[in-house]
């Protein structure tokens, strides 16, 4: 123990005062020989002993009180080993930056990182002492900052206590910049920032440091759990795509799961819920730092045009990012006009038999497509504006006027698919239909000659190359056996072309000839399939790949979304809500039940309105009230909000990313060191207790 | 009615004189009071009835009234009284006036004077100092008064001391008086462990004796008027304690009140005549109250407080 003001110890001689008073008082006391002594002390001698004890206690209390006063004034202190940050007491400007990003919910033991940071901040605040000007900041992205430093430690403690985790990722760089700006307003020479954060690399921006290197205030990083490895597993993305093989409502849900740790995980549970019901479960195993995609097949429930999809991981120390929310919508209906180039009274012999069956699997009404079939002659009478896609199936060459009409329709955004066959005369096509052909036709290649079946099969072409990333083929697995196993006995070879800008070969046969060619025209698309759409030239229609191929091709041409999920919004970002002309009031209800209303001037004359209250992950419901006062839910406007996956990565930043301070004393502050502990507070408290005890003893 | 201050009486020359002054003062007060009667024995005339002793007929009354009356006192047998004086150490306490022992000895001397004058047999027992033989057997001769007062005077001169309990003296009295109902008068501060004196008094009363107690206390003991740091030393042992009296006054008076209530209640409950006397109270008044209470008849136990 040592003293800051040792001269004050001279006052310790004051301890003699009560003793002297006691002794002198005893000597000067009148002596009375008294008979009723028993009544003075009670009838028992032990009472007299108790009285003597009380007198002694009183003397001791007074002596100690006299000793405590100079001791407290001498400001005694001691030192002890501590593992917290090194804190210098005294006049200074300090900013406590506390990470309250969603990662601060990470549980280490039975406490979250934020709880630990809060406790550390209390410790630092008390060690800074009353002469320090202090501010408390949070470091989640877009957090608000106080405007000035304060010495009101009670308020500062309240500010620390009031910090709650947000759903935003860490924005450490921004918080440090604000802290440095606050410190710049102070006249203190000694300026320091205490950063209570795991200091994840994702919270720091190497390209935009908070201050120029070597110029900032002293930075002390206080990791909330210095010895813990903050391994974390998170669902970082989810997409939903149609899966025609599972029916018209079949979907394929792809969840991206990332491991942000050093250990990896083995057989970790993952599940998919649709409309609150778990529809699929699985396991994922990841190597350290690995990111994988897990696919699930499911069916959207009937009776809804949209559905809530939640992908959940079994809980880990940070449960917040173990869910990902998505709104999946049923596809819009695609109007398809089939131009049957080879109609037949026998349906099975008709050119479009397989095509129609693929577009309307099971003849179900909710297939997502409305198919209209016409002959070539009837095409001219059709109002093309009513259709999204037109398929010319083995149709003979069209008249120039029809081609012009079709060309204009494609320019306006229509999608035209041309399949060849025996009715297709390459010369006639090249002559009249060149404007709507992705590539001119050459001649048909027939491999079906010879009597021996095995020979014919050997010569037959197969689909071997696909643009796997193209939306049409993205639904197929890598090998796409449903396509590769089909044999093509006759194909249409295409002529040479130099137009490569807006043209792409999406698939090729074994011999390298183009099987599917796509070209852009205006706002529309053209697709040329160099074989028949029925079984005349190939057996693709009876292979499993035919149906998804046709479905995807039609969707692609119609430019209707093949991704069934509406893009979700990140926490804190704005969502754009469509506004109908009749809307007088739009109410958005968040996942926590909080309602926010957009009305009046905010809606007047707008077709869209921005909604910024996306501060929690989950589903946001939208309801609109029209002029008649009728309120209806607006499913098509509902949206999901998800965490920014960057915040899930708690791996520490490399030292090169940590801002360097101008004082050269920055860096982590978690090492063991000795800390001064002042004892005068305890002595003052003891003095108060002694005075209280003395009062009690005197009054008894 | 005016009485002589106890301190004035104390200044008188000898105990017989003091006793006489006290008794005469008391009897003067008695004549002026509305009570008529004697002190220890009430002399009255009773109309003669067959069976009464003829020799007890008051012929003077017959001469005046032409009726036969017999004197009642002459009819009663001679009273035996035992006067018990507490001379233990606690009786030595002296406040502003007489010590408790002095006061009590004057009371006892006065009673001895009165009783001897009435030709009653009076014995004396003094306890407290185990080394002092303070017992005088009961006698009725006039010269016996001299013996009694001499012993009392001797004790008062020696001063109080010792811690012999009252029970020793009272038990001796009880043994002597077992064959005959007697008047037993105790003058004491009753400050004994476990209230031993009270217990013995109640037992004597239960044996049929007429028992009276002068509970003698100094005003300081009752009011505890001390101020300033004081060392209180016990009178009967070596205990001593430094005390700020104001801090213990309330508790002391509470205990003293409880003790007085216990003494009064214990005496009343057993039929013992109880007189609480302060040493600043005139001695004649004390004696007068006693005589009046005796005159009030045998209507049960009585208590007097000053």
Image (cartoon, helix red, strand yellow):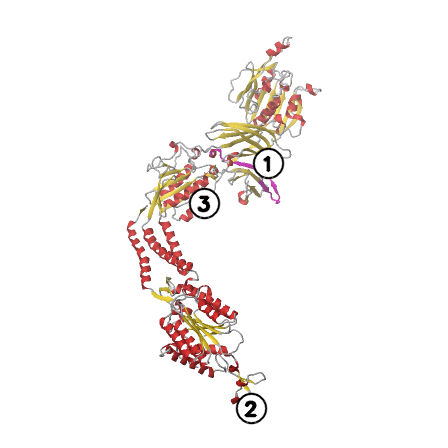
SS at badge 3: helix
Residue that badge 2 annotates: B66
Numbered label tally = 3
Q: Which percent across, then down, holds residue A228?
A: 44, 34
Q: Are marks 1 and 3 on the same chain?
A: yes
Give the spatial CA distance, label 1 vs label 3: 35 Å
Q: Nearer the viewer, residue A250 or A31?
A: A31
| Mark 2 belongs to chain | B
Crowding around mark 3 (Cα neighbors within 10 Å: few <14, some 14 to 19, many 20+) is some
Q: Nearer the viewer, residue A449 or B210?
A: B210
Q: Nearer the viewer, residue A113 or A6?
A: A6
Image point (56%, 83%), residue name: B52
Give the spatial CA distance, label 3 vs label 2: 116 Å
Quadrant for residue A121, please give it: top left
Residue that badge 3 annotates: A161
Give the spatial CA distance, label 2 vs label 1: 133 Å
Nearer the camera: disc 3 or disc 2: 2
Cβ atoms under marks 3 and 2 closer than 8 Å: no
Q: Are marks 2 and 1 on the same chain?
A: no
Q: Which percent across, then down, holds residue B246?
A: 39, 65
Crowding around mark 2 (Cα neighbors within 10 Å: few <14, some 14 to 19, many 20+) is few
- In the image, residue B206 sits, relative to residue A592, either above or below, namely below
Residue that badge 1 annotates: A276
The range drawn in magenta is A622-646
Whether residue A104 is in magenta: the answer is no
Image point (43%, 70%), residue name: B188
Rendered image: mark on residue A683: none
Q: Which percent across, then down, holds residue B35?
A: 50, 81
Residue A92 visible in the current orientation: yes
| Mark 3 belongs to chain | A
Q: Nearer the viewer, residue A38 or B290?
A: B290
Query: Where's the C terminus of chain A, which quadrant?
Result: bottom left
């Amino acid at each position: 123990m040592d003293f800051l003001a040792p001269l004050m110890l001279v006052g310790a001689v004051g301890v003699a005062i009560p003793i002297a008073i006691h002794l002198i008082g005893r000597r000067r006391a009148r002596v009375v020989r008294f008979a009723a002594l028993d009544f003075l002390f009670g009838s028992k001698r032990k009472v007299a002993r108790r009285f003597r004890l009380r007198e002694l206690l009183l003397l001791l209390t007074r002596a100690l009180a006299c000793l405590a006063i100079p001791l407290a004034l001498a400001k005694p202190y001691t030192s002890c080993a501590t593992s917290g940050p090194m804190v210098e007491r005294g006049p200074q400007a300090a900013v406590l930056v506390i990470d309250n990003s969603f990662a601060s919910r990470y549980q280490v033991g039975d406490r979250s990182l934020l709880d630990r940071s809060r406790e550390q901040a209390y410790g630092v605040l008390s060690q800074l002492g009353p002469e320090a000007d202090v501010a408390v900041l949070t470091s989640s992205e877009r957090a608000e900052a106080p405007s000035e430093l304060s010495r009101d430690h009670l308020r500062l403690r309240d500010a620390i206590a009031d910090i709650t985790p947000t759903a935003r990722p860490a924005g450490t760089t921004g918080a440090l910049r604000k802290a440095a700006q606050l410190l710049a307003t102070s006249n203190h020479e000694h300026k320091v920032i205490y950063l209570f954060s795991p200091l994840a690399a994702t919270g720091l921006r190497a390209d935009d440091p908070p201050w120029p290197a070597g110029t900032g205030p002293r930075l002390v990083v206080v990791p909330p759990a210095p010895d813990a490895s903050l391994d974390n597993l998170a669902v970082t993305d989810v997409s939903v795509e149609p899966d025609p093989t599972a029916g018209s409502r079949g979907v394929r849900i792809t969840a991206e799961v990332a491991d942000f740790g050093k250990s990896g995980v083995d057989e970790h549970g993952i599940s998919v819920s649709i409309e609150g019901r778990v529809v699929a479960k699985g396991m994922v195993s990841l190597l350290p730092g690995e990111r994988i995609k897990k696919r699930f097949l499911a069916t959207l429930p009937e009776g809804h045009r949209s559905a809530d999809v939640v992908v959940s991981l079994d809980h880990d120390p940070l449960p917040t990012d173990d869910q990902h929310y998505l709104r999946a919508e049923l596809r819009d209906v695609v109007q398809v006009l089939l131009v049957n180039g080879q109609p037949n009274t026998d349906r099975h012999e008709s050119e479009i038999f397989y095509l129609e069956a693929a577009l309307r699997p099971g003849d179900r009404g909710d297939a997502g497509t409305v198919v209209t079939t016409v002959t070539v002659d009837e095409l001219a009478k059709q109002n093309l504006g009513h259709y999204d896609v037109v398929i010319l199936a083995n149709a003979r060459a069209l008249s120039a006027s029809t081609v012009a009409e079709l060309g204009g329709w494609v320019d306006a955004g229509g999608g035209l698919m041309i399949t060849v066959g025996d009715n297709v005369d390459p010369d006639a096509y090249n002559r009249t239909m060149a404007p709507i052909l992705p590539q001119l036709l050459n001649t048909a290649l027939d491999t079906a000659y010879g009597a021996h079946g095995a020979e014919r099969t050997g010569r037959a072409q197969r689909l071997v190359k696909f643009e796997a990333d193209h939306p049409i083929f993205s639904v197929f697995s890598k090998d796409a056996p449903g396509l590769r196993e089909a044999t093509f006995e006759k194909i249409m070879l295409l002529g040479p072309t130099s137009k490569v800008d807006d043209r792409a070969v999406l698939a090729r046969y074994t011999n390298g000839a183009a099987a599917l060619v796509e070209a852009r025209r205006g706002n529309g698309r053209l697709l040329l399939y160099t074989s028949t759409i029925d079984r005349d030239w190939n057996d693709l229609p009876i292979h499993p790949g035919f149906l998804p191929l046709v479905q995807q091709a039609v969707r692609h041409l119609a430019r209707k979304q093949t991704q069934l999920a509406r893009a979700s919004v990140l926490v804190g970002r704005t969502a754009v809500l469509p506004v109908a002309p009749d809307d007088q009031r739009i109410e958005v209800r968040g996942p926590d039940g909080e309602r926010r209303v957009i009305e009046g001037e905010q809606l007047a004359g707008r077709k869209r309105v921005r909604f910024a209250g996306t501060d929690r992950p989950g589903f946001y419901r939208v309801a609109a009230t029209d002029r008649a006062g009728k309120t209806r839910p607006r499913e098509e406007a509902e949206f999901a909000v998800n965490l920014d996956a960057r915040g899930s990565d708690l791996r520490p930043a490399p030292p090169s990313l940590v801002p360097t301070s101008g004082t050269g004393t920055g860096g982590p502050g978690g090492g063991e060191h000795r800390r001064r502990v002042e004892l005068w507070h305890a002595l003052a408290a003891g003095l108060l207790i002694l005075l209280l005890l003395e009062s009690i003893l005197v009054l008894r | 009615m005016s009485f002589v201050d106890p301190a004035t009486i104390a200044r008188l020359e000898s105990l017989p004189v003091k006793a006489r002054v006290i008794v005469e003062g008391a009897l003067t007060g008695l004549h002026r009071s509305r009570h008529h009667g004697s002190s220890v024995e009430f002399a009255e005339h009773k109309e003669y009835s067959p069976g009464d002793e003829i020799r007890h007929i008051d012929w003077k009354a017959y001469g005046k009234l032409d009726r036969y009356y017999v004197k009642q006192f002459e009819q009663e047998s001679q009273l035996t009284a035992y006067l018990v004086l507490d001379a233990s150490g606690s009786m030595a306490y002296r406040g502003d006036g007489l010590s408790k022992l002095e006061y009590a000895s004057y009371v006892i001397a006065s009673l001895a004077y009165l009783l001897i004058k009435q030709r009653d047999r009076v014995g004396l027992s003094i306890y407290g100092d185990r080394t002092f033989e303070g017992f005088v057997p009961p006698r009725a001769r006039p010269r016996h008064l001299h013996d009694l007062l001499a012993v009392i005077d001797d004790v008062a001169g020696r001063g109080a001391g010792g811690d012999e309990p009252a029970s020793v003296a009272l038990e001796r009295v009880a043994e002597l008086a077992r064959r005959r109902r007697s008047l037993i008068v105790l003058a004491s501060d009753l400050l004994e462990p476990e209230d031993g004196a009270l217990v013995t008094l109640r037992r004597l009363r239960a044996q049929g004796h007429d028992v009276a107690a002068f509970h003698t206390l100094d005003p300081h003991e009752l009011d505890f008027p001390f101020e300033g740091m004081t060392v209180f030393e016990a009178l009967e042992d070596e205990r001593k304690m430094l005390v700020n009296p104001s801090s213990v006054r309330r508790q002391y008076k509470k205990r003293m009140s409880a003790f007085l209530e216990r003494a009064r209640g214990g005496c009343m409950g057993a039929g013992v005549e109880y007189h609480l006397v302060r040493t600043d109270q005139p001695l004649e008044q004390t004696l007068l109250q006693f005589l009046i209470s005796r005159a009030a008849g045998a209507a049960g136990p009585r208590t007097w407080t000053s």
